[in-house]
Image: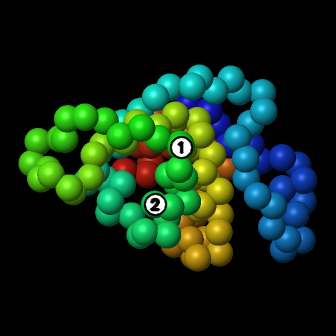
Amino acid sequence: AAALAAASAAASAAATGATKALSWRPDVSRVRHIVTLQESVWSALPEEDQDYLFPAGSFLEQWPLQLGNKEGEGYPRNVTLSEFEDRLLALLQEPRHAQRVRLCPESYTKGVHKRMVK
């Protein structure tokens, strides 16, 4: 998985109380995988976030409907993972989300995971 970069500028900005947007490390190759998000996942997001994460032309609706969905409830959406990650990262840095989500610019390893799920 691509790791977030904590540039020295971001570290010095944090030390002075300024903020700097996080971005993906430019030295990490990001493959353009396509992933499917089920309707039950994306439709649970606030409409404003859905509009931001799924702009027109950024996804394809998949047929058939998933089991349990009724006609008209929405189709699963196929998205390019790297583009979706970019939009999600930008969305989570907006002030309305900053107080609910803490972004940690560090590598996510098995050791980190084990400490977090204790």
Earlier in the chain: of badge 1 and badge 2, it is 2
Measured as percent of width and height from the top left, residue 22 is found at 73, 53
SS at mark 2?
A: helix
Residue matched to label 2: 50
Image quadrant in which you'd find residue 78: top left
Q: CA distance from mark 1 to mark 2?
A: 13 Å
**Residue shown at 83%/46% (left/top)?**
7
Q: Are marks 1 and 2 in contact (CB under 8 Å)?
A: no
- Decide if residue 90 is on the left or right side of residue 38: right
* Front in this rendered view, residue 11 or 92: 92
Quarter of the picture containing the N terminus is top right
From the viewer's perspective, is residue 81 above or below residue 85? above
Measured as percent of width and height from the top left, residue 41 is found at 31, 53
- Decide if residue 68 is on the left or right side of residue 20: left
Amino acid of disc 1: Gly
Residue matched to label 1: 57
Measured as percent of width and height from the top left, residue 82 is found at 58, 35
Q: Let me know if residue 109 appears in the view.
A: no
Image quadrant in which you'd find residue 72: bottom left
**Residue shown at 65%/69% (left/top)?**
94
Residue 20's mark? none
> Callout 1: few (<14), some (14-19), or many (20+) C-alpha neighbours within 10 Å?
few
**Residue shown at 61%/71% (left/top)?**
98
From the viewer's perspective, is residue 46 above or below residue 29? below
**Residue shown at 89%/71% (left/top)?**
16
> Callout 2: few (<14), some (14-19), or many (20+) C-alpha neighbours within 10 Å?
few
Measured as percent of width and height from the top left, residue 59 is found at 47, 41
* Front in this rendered view, residue 83 or 115: 83
SS at mark 1?
A: loop
